[in-house]
Amino acid sequence: MKTLIGPISQLLTLDKLPLKGALKDEQLEVIEKAGILMEDEKILETGVFSELLIKANSLNAKIIELKSDFVAMPGWIDCHTHICFGGSRARDFSMRNAGKSYLEIAEAGGGIWDTVTQTRNLSQSELAKRTVLNANRHFNDGVTTIEVKSGYGLTVDEELKMLRGIKEASCETKADVIPTCLAAHMKPRDFEGTNQEYLKIIAEELFPILISENLSNRIDSFIEKSAFSAEEIKEYYLKAKDCGFELTVHADQFTPGGSEVAVNFNAKSADHLEASSDKEIELLAKSNTVAVALPGASIGLGCAFTPARKILDQGGSLAIGSDWNPGSAPMGDLVAQASILATFEKLSTAEVLAALTFRAAAALGLEDRGKLKKGLLADFNLYSTHDYREILYHQGKMKPGQVWKRGLKM
């Protein structure tokens, strides 16, 4: 079915913007009094509504005329979340704000292991339901593609439960869900062997099932002093690459080292990067690995933001994810977090929009979305305003008036 929607006060295609480097707002393609002509789930053409109307009538397309001001832009893409989990970590947040250290919180029963325990206590069906609730909230905020990680199971069976729950959830939410296996989040406390022994079991026993059940084509790990070292993770990533998985890395959150692993393995993305120095920034900028800033974790933990300005100025590709998780980033509001990051890192509107759309798509290895152009998915948001700058100006408070997914108003 062919459909034309318009006239749209401003349509931002984000077309012709490069994947890497700094961007100026003057580079944005803004079409006024625009329309989007679609066929089924894809875009046939964007342009001036009055011109597209002639073509649409000749094609017997359905015409949807808008009677008020709207700004259209691609659906947001959140390339880093942990929205499949059990329980809450409100106690951690309260203790952290009261001055307790990470170690003190962990010794009091908090931290990642608390979430692992609460997640293990839930069934696959219960995890799927919680994931659907979170994904639908994100979708209503205009996030049409959502990456979702495992990593709170930390045994073969429990990781499978999570990933099967994520797959189940993907059939029940309007958003596209991109599953990622983060079994290498940390060595579980109830595993008596070494880090390498744990990783070996995961690689040998879990990887084949991920492939046979089509549960995930992405492998992630947390490279940090409290998790796995750069040296320990090498064999794990070599095995993952041999199996055909795409790679991503939790890198440089508290100490540097992970981003170098990401670059050396040609990972799709290196995420966090709050502790990246000039050396790591240069490595990333010269690579094809997308740097993913996670301002939600910086806000939640009260630590420095990812050096986004430096990454862009060095020529790197920057995406922004929410890191929505129960511990360090419970807010889960992608646009609010991106707006705050822009304020502190002095990012242009064009840089933020790119980071939430086609550059985030690149971090997930997706080439069919993130811009409004011929042949790509008709995933877009309509905001009730006449000026696209209002969206970030309201720092997450302005929500889409309409969310379109694969050519359908949802």
Image (tube, helix red, strand yellow):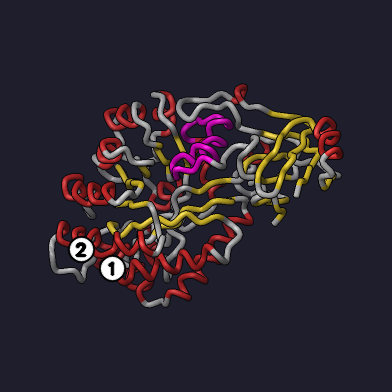
| Circle 1 residue | 156
Q: In this view, does 11 lie to the left or right of 162?
A: right
Give the vertical position of 103 relative to 160 (above or below).
Answer: above
Residue at the image point whose x is 65% and y is 39% from the top: 73
Q: Is residue 243 left or right of residue 201?
A: right
Amino acid marked by disc 1: Val
Residue at the image point whose x is 13% and y is 61% from the top: 194
Determine contact: label 2, label 1, CB under 8 Å: yes
Mark 2 surroundings: few (<14), some (14-19) or many (≥20) residues within 10 A: some
- Report helix, strand or loop for mark 1: helix
- Mark toward the start of the polypeptide (2 vs 1): 1
Given residues 14 and 39, the one toward you in this image is 39
Mark 1 surroundings: few (<14), some (14-19) or many (≥20) residues within 10 A: some
| Circle 2 residue | 201
Magenta-drawn stretch contains 214: no
Amino acid marked by disc 2: Ile
Residue interval drawn in magenta: 344-367
Residue at the image point whose x is 70% and y is 53% from the top: 408
Instruction: Please provide percent x and percent y for residue 353.
Output: 57, 36
Residue at the image point whose x is 42% and y is 71% from the top: 87
Main SS of residues in magenta: helix
Given residues 98 and 395, the one toward you in this image is 395
Label ID, residue 330: none
